[in-house]
Each structure stands twice: as C-alpha cells, then as structure tokens.
Amino acid sequence: MLTEPQKRISEKALKVWRISGGIKAVVGWVFAAAALFIIHIFDGPIWLTSSIIIAGVIFTFLLTFLFPALRWKRWRYEVREEEIELQEGIFIRTKTLIPMIRVQHVDTVQGPILRKYQLASVIVNTAATAHEIPALEENEAEELRYSISNLAKVADEDV
Amino acid sequence: MSEPKRLHPIVIAINVSKKLKDFFFTIIALFFIGNKGDGGQLLLVGGSLLVVIYIFVSSFLSWLRYSYRLENGEIRIEYGVLVRKKRYIPFDRIQSIDISEGVLQRLFGMVKVQIETAGGNGVDEAEAVLSAISKEEAQSIQDYVAELKTPRLADTEEQEFLNTNSVIYKITTKHLLLLSLTSGGVGVVISAVAAFLSQIDELIPFERVFRGIETLAVGNVIIVAVLVFIGFFIAWILALIGTILKYANFTVIKTEHDLVISQGLLERRQITIPLNRIQAVRINENIIRQLLGFSTVLIESAGGSASNQEGSKVAVLPLIKNREIALTLQPLVPDYHIDIPFSPVPKRALSRYIFRSWLLVIPIVIIALIFLKVWGLLSLVILVAATFWAFLKFKDAGWNIEKEQLSLRYRAMVRTTILTKKNRIQSLEVKESYFQQKKELATIETFVKVGFGGAGGRVLDLGKKDVEQIFSWFSKIKRD
C-alpha cells in the first residue's frame, strides 16, 4: 500500500465548497421551477412533479453537504524537493505525480468566495498538463508558489 | 547571411487563391439570398468587388512586409501590415522542420518550410511558416542549422566526421500498396465529403432533392443500400489513392543529430526532427494490420500544430512487419527497448472490461427490442461484437518497465503501444474507483508533451500491486 500524501488543504475549503454548491443548487432550482411551471400548465402527472422535487432535494443535499465533505477528506498534497504529489477525487481516487523538473510555471488564483475567506488556489503547469491545488490559506499559497517555482528553477533541460 | 530576405512572390498568388476560396462560398450564398431586387444585386456586386480588391492588396502588402533572416543562431522573422511583429526563434529550440512542396510550389521550383517549437498552443499554424522559398534557400537554412550543431559535438571526445547519413527505411511498392489497402483513411474521406457538402448546401436545393430520394427510398430500400455501398467504395478508393500519393517514395534517413523523413509523389515533403527531441515512440496496429502481423511506428515530438500534425506525430515506419520493428528502429532510437515482454491485466479485470462495453450496448439492445420487436433481436449481434471487442481490449492491455522506460499497451480501436522515458513524462496519474478498489485494480495514465492533442497512454484496470510499482518507479523518493 502506498502512503498517502501528508498535507491537507484548508478546513475553510469546506465552507467555500458549500457556498459554491449552494449557488449551483439555486441555479438548479431555477430550472426545476421552470420545469414544474410547464408541467403545471400542461396538467402533467403528479408523480413527475414529485420526483423532480425529490431529486432536487437530494441534489441540494449532495452539493452542499456530502460532496464537499468527501472531497475535503480526500484532498491531500505534498510538495517535495523533486516532485509534487496530489490526491483527490470523490468516487474515483486520483493520485498524481509531477516531477519538479517538468514544472513550467505556477499560478495562484483567487475567486470572490475564496477571497472572502482569505484563501487561494495554486495551479501547477507542466508543458502538457495543469494541476490545481484548491483552497489553501492565502499565505500558504503564496509560499507554495514561491517554493515550487524556486525548486523548478533547478531544471535546465527543456520539455 | 544576415540580410533580410523576402519570400518568393508566388506567395501572393497562394494567399489570394486561399482567401478567394474561403470567400467564394460566401459570395455564392449571398447571391442566393440577395437575389430579389436589382438594387440589392448591384450592392452585392460592388461589395464583392471591394472584398476581392482588398484580398489582393492585403496579400501583396503582407508579402511585402514579411521578411526573414538567419542571425546569431536564430531565425528572425518580421511581418504584419498594420501591427508589425517580430519573431525570433533560437535554432536550439526547434522541435521539427518540415519542408514540403505542394503542386503550386513545385511549378515554380519552390518549397514551403514550417518550423515548429514546443511553444504555442498547437491550435494555429507552425511557429514559423515560410510559404515559398527556393530550394537552395531552404538548403542553406538547413546547412546553417547543421553548422550550429556541429561545433558543440567537436568539443566532446574524438570526432567521427564520417558522413553518418544512413538510410534506415525505404518503403517498397508492395508495402505501399498494403499500407494503402489497410489504411483507415476512409473515415477521413467521408468526413471531407460531408464537410464539402455542408459547404455547398446553399448551392444545391438539397431539400427538394432529398424529398425525391425519400419517396424513392420508401419504395426501394435496395437502391439506397447499393448507393451507400457505392459511396463507401468510392471513398475507399479515394483514400487508397490519397495514401499512395502521400507515402510514395517514403524514406527515413538518420543524420548525425536528426531524423529526416521524405515522402510524397505530387506533394513532396521532408520532415526533420532532432533526435534528442523525441518524446515518445508509439506503435499502432489496426485490426487488419494486426492480423497480417504489421504495425505503424510513430515518433512523437513536442512540435506540431493543428495545420501541421505531421510535425508532432511522425510515422517513421508507416508499415512494418512486427518482428522487424526492433531491428529497424534500434539505430534511430538506440536508448529505447523495443522487444519487451508485457505484463498483462489480471483475470479479475475481465468482467469490468466486458461490463464497460455493455454499459453502452445494453440500452441500445433494449430500445431495439422494444421498438423493433423480433427484428430487434438482430441487435444482439452488436452485443456479441462488443463483448468480443472488450475481450480483445482486455487481452491487449499491459505494461512493462525496463530501466528508465515505461511501456504501456492498450486498445481503443487500434492497438497502441507507447514507449516513454521517465524524464519525458510530464505527469503520471493513478486512479481507483470504489469498485476498482474492491477488486484491487487501478488505472494508470501518463502525459507526454506532444504538439497537437494530448498524448501519453492509459491502461485500465491493472493489478493494484503493478500500478503501485509503476508509481514508485516514477517517484523520486524511496517508498516501501
């Protein structure tokens, strides 16, 4: 059994994901309401109406409670001298290894919700792929970006 | 040679004809729409005339402004009419050079040079495109590049300045025919025809035509079937001719630092790839070729773009007997291990392979049974075929680690074997779903930098122990 990476992302990520899940749920409800309205106009069957509502409630629960919790529990990362290791995924656990010499550049990004909670995401780019470490504490993200780009500088071969 | 040079003026004609071609369909369409009223037509003619004039003038100006020179180990290009741009590309960074002679260029004894770097997003054209320069000029660029490379070698150990150019592979007529007969290019031709039809559907009153066909079709299914068959047959013949023209005179030469591939009959082209730029070796076998014991070997480099896909995935051996691959490829890529045993996917994965194929097919079968009743039973043939295919996928999947090289083998439509060196892999992923975990299986995926389209390999449902071994092999830290 391989060992898991050690570091977790910020616990505030849970809140952020709940909020963004909530926003998605609201958007979903708008569509559901439209559908319900149309069904009402055309005198649709009652089972259709009720199953839409039940599905809506379940999805709201999943988006705002279960998924953020599972996602946070799974998310781990570790930045070592020569490589970066990530672990993520709710249903499918994905472990990723990125050699430091393959890192081309590192970004930090911060959306409005993340900013409100003083969080930021770090995106590590290789020549072929991009990998996001979501919702780290602002200063931690800054430090990470700095140290990764420093460690990556050592590499002198290209692509 | 540092004085700036222009391209041959034939470039103007090439650009004008290309732009006119794009514009042509628009004009035709406009004529059909704006057919009513004389005033509208006059406006249309005037507008078209203006556009045509604009095309001529802008093509001329962009030719006038386009210049290139070789300086300081770089190719320096200046271009742009309104916004003037300069692009300097160090020859060190070149991933591939592609010299081609289209029919138009050949009439004037010109060639087109496309230079690829690893930069750019691979969506547009090559990083530098010299649409028409004389052959001597192209040769002098190549000489310049070669000259740059040689001194660097001179400092290292004894120099072997023999002429190291050696022919690695030359296609035989028999193989050329076999290659064309077994090529999967039919799909390409069909889609090209479809694209062409969609272009001219403003021209032909398709609806009326189809209504005619429809009434005919109801009465006569056989005629339609025959028509479809004829259509496929023509498409196949066209693909066959296309492949013959493309791969005629196919030759691979290895020089000191580069791999040089020349090919083509009507449109000749020559691709140069520095040997140290090779990212991965890919061996493809479509089902027919696999049965005959042949495969295609591609070399992947980080250059290449949408309009020049050959720049990133080059067929170095378009058709070769499987047992000859290792011997032929060895001099080209001496550090790759080609004859290697593959560890298979464990037996317990078979049910997952079959289940995955059923996921898509079962609903089709059910729908067919519901709507077509007895005839729906025919869809069971699809089910059997899908199951057989899933079994093939299961049987073909495998992996191997040989020192610094990871080899993955898997099948989608064609069986693919991808050989990569550890230091060329950009990132590596291991995936386990809940169900895979229960069966102690996992999926492995690697990513390699290739100019156009993602590349790498993915093998589903390998044994967990095996995947862990690959993961540890790729990791820089010691793991238990």
Image (cartoon, grey):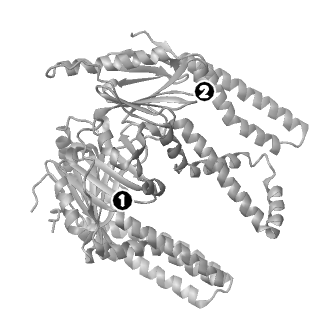
Q: Which mark is residue B410?
A: 1
Q: Residue at x 55, y 48 (%)?
A: B181
The quadrant the N terminus of chain B occupies is: top left
| A76 or B365: nearer the viewer | B365
Q: Position of residue B112 (x, y in %)?
A: 51, 25
- The type of residue carrying mark 1 is Tyr
SS for tag 1?
strand
| B131 or B180: nearer the viewer | B180
Seen in the picture, residue B344 relative to B253 is either above or below; the reply is: below
Q: Is residue B58 visible?
A: no
- Position of A10 with respect to B379 (left or right) is left
Q: Position of residue A12 (x, y in %)?
A: 25, 66
Q: Please tell me how crowded label 1 is: few (under 14), some (14-19), or many (20+) other residues with Cα within 10 Å.
A: many
- Are labels 1 and 2 assigned to the same chain? yes
Pinpoint the chain carrying mark 2. Answer: B
- Position of A69 with respect to B223 (left or right) is left
On the image, numbered disc 2 is attached to which residue? B103
The residues tagged by marks 1 and 2 sit, at their Cα atoms, a distance apart of 39 Å
Q: Position of residue B71 (x, y in %)?
A: 35, 15
Q: Which mark is residue B184?
A: none
Of callouts 1 and 2, the N-terminal one: 2
| B439 or B216: nearer the viewer | B216
